């Protein structure tokens, strides 16, 4: 018609056709095809349940497992793992109306879960044409989805339903929450964070992002929405261990009273899952038996002298029998891989595990994704507000159902100055130091009075107190390592100065000294400090030793590089005592011991 009609006439014809379809849709009689699990009636003006029991049961299983697993990805993996297939009715061709079994695909599952037909609601106008998105030469372009509940026609209870309308709306909210967008929580993921998608900033209301350490722990929650959108400073951030511990303890406290009910439900779920899979396998076997019996009847019904037909029917019979054997073998393998029937000992063990909820939560067999799913079942949102730059943070947990609880946690900070009680810690430490208390006594008293160092929930010890006092200027580093320049004789060096001249770490040079590769003596005035000797010739030898590289696994360092020269002094320089070699240190010559 495009070649015989003008654009105006063609547009008018399209409008008339659409109006006719719309009038038919308002009566609930406009159908172009039947979704999976449905068939069109003989008159074509209504939908009915698929008469095949297995086809209906698989569709019902999709909705049941989505309620349990919570995402299309997990549902797809479950169906692939258990070899569950969907029954499609061919729409055209010589085999139109026949049932064909195909593996589940993500777009198919998405369409089943989103289509209102399965909730019994007839709709028309789920898509519309957007001329701005139409591309020349591509007829299928320009089609966009209409927003839910804004369709042209909507007739509740007009189609046999697999689920209720309330359940359909719940599924749509869950699908919307599974999207990976800033205003949605997203699906549980495999990362180590417990509150990914649930933590929100109490200052700006944005969802906080999760940042992982290179080794996976700790987890950091950071609000960077303003930084990404408008190059503003980062709103707030905190390490997630204390926050996650708080939420986990509250969740465990909430589900602890239901431990007995959980054990009973776990036993029932295991039994129901086994029975559901077994029913599906029995239907497959029954279908294979029916196909084999039909092929046998067709073969026996043919006349013996009609060999051309008999050979074809015999081949079909053999194929049906082979298919029956294949399904039987698959069923046997599924039974072998499937968990066995629960015994009384198994039920008692499940009840004991359910009674110990914290132990089950912290078990090595419990994955992070399972913990995330448990938290999402109970917690809707966690709002965090850090008090300035201090260690105090306010946390509000909003539970499913609307209840809220407010808590305060102590987060990790980098400096003592960020602590809200920094001045009290400083004054108490200085006061006790002035009274003659040791670092260990100061640490013990501060811990007893409830003070904590900046990082984590650890306690003070003498090393932490010594470092704190040194930084505050009330104590100095150990004086035994200091060597006055006047104590050095000709061609003598302090350890750090010689290491800097050679461009090497002090620890490596100290190792050379204990191996006897460098001449050294102790300083009598300082009490234990080492003074190393190296003239110009010795410096050249040490530089060559520093730049030497092993050419093979068994190659030894040349003796002239590891033999120190003799200083020309009036009094001898005692060599440092050799360090006792451990099993992990190199043997003389630089080789590690072979295990």
Image (spheres, rainbow, N blue to C red):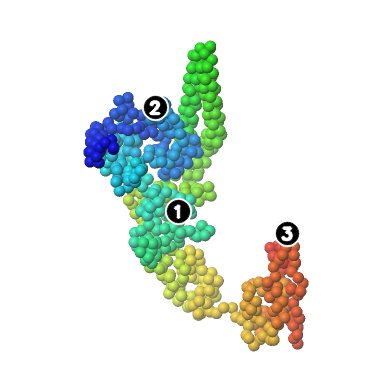
**Secondary structure under badge 3?**
loop
- Disc on the earlier residue, 2 or 1: 2
Does the rendering let one see residue 172? no
* Residue named by callout 1: 194
Measuring from the top left, give residue 41's x and y in whole percent.
32, 26
Quadrant housing residue 513: bottom right
Residue at image coords 37%, 48%: 177
- Disc on the earlier residue, 1 or 3: 1
Q: Quadrant of the N terminus?
A: top left
**Secondary structure under badge 2?**
loop
View extreme (front): residue = 4
Residue at image coords 52%, 24%: 320
Judge left or right: residue 518 versus residue 356: right
Q: Are marks 1 and 3 in contact (CB under 8 Å)?
A: no
Measuring from the top left, give residue 29's x and y in whole percent.
27, 31
| Separation (CA) of disc 3 from disc 2 | 74 Å
Q: Are marks 3 and 2 in contact (CB under 8 Å)?
A: no
- Disc on the earlier residue, 3 or 2: 2
Mark drawn on residue 308: none
Mark drawn on residue 594: 3
Judge left or right: residue 108 versus residue 509: left
Question: Above or below — where is 537 with respect to 163?
Answer: below
Residue at image coords 70%, 74%: 544
* Residue named by callout 2: 97
Of tags 2 and 1, the one toward the viewer is 2
Residue at image coords 41%, 41%: 107
Judge left or right: residue 391 versus residue 5: right
């Amino acid at each position: 018609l495009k070649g015989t009609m003008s654009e105006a006439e063609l547009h008018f014809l399209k409008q008339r056709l659409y109006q006719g379809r719309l009038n038919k849709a308002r009566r609930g009689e406009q159908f172009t095809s039947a979704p999976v699990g449905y068939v069109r009636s003989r008159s074509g003006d209504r939908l009915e349940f698929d008469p095949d029991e297995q086809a209906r049961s698989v569709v019902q299983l999709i909705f049941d497992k989505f309620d349990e697993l919570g995402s299309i990805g997990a549902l797809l993996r479950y169906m692939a793992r258990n070899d569950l297939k969907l029954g499609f009715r061919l729409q055209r061709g010589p085999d139109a109306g026949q049932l064909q079994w195909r593996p589940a695909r993500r777009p198919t599952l998405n369409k089943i879960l989103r289509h209102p037909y399965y909730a019994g609601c007839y709709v028309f106008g789920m898509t519309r044409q957007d001329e701005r998105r139409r591309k020349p030469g591509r007829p299928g372009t320009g089609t966009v989805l209409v927003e839910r509940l804004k369709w042209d026609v909507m007739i509740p209870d007009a189609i046999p339903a697999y689920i209720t309308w309330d359940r359909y709306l719940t599924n749509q909210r869950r699908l919307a929450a599974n999207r990976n967008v800033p205003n949605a929580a997203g699906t549980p993921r495999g990362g180590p964070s417990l509150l990914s998608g649930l933590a929100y900033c109490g200052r700006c209301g944005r969802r906080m992002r999760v940042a992982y350490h290179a080794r996976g722990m700790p987890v950091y929650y950071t609000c960077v929405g303003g930084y990404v959108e408008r190059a503003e400073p980062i709103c707030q951030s905190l390490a997630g261990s204390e926050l996650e511990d708080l939420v986990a303890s509250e969740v465990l406290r909430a589900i602890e009273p239901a431990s007995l009910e959980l054990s009973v439900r776990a036993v029932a779920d295991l039994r129901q899952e086994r029975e559901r899979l077994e029913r599906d396998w029995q239907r497959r076997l029954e279908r294979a038996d029916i196909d084999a019996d039909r092929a046998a009847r067709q073969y026996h019904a043919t006349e013996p002298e009609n060999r051309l037909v008999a050979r074809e029917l015999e081949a079909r019979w053999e194929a049906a029998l082979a298919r029956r054997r294949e399904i039987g073998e698959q069923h046997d393998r599924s039974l072998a891989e499937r968990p066995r029937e629960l015994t009384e000992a198994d039920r008692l063990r499940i009840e004991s595990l359910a009674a110990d909820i914290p132990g089950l939560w912290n078990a090595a067999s419990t994955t992070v994704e399972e913990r995330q799913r448990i938290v999402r079942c109970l917690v809707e949102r966690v709002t965090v507000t850090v008090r300035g730059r201090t260690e105090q943070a306010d946390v509000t947990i909003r539970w499913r159902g609307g209840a809220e609880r407010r808590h305060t946690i102590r987060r990790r900070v980098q400096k003592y100055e960020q602590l809200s009680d920094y001045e009290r810690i400083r004054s108490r430490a200085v006061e006790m130091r002035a009274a003659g208390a040791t670092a260990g006594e100061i640490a013990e008293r501060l811990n007893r009075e409830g003070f904590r160092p900046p990082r984590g929930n650890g306690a003070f010890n003498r090393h932490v107190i010594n470092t704190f006092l040194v930084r505050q200027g009330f104590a100095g580093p150990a004086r035994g390592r200091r060597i006055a320049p006047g104590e050095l004789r000709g061609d003598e060096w302090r350890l750090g100065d010689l290491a800097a001249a050679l461009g090497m770490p002090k620890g490596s040079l100290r190792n050379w000294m204990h191996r006897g590769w460098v001449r050294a003596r102790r300083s009598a005035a300082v009490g234990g400090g080492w003074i190393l000797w190296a003239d110009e010739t010795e410096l050249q030898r040490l530089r060559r030793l520093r730049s030497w590289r092993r050419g093979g696994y068994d190659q030894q360092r040349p003796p002239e590089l590891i033999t120190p020269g003799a200083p020309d002094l009036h009094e001898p320089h005692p060599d440092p005592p050799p360090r006792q070699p451990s099993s992990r240190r190199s043997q003389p010559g630089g080789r590690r011991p072979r295990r």
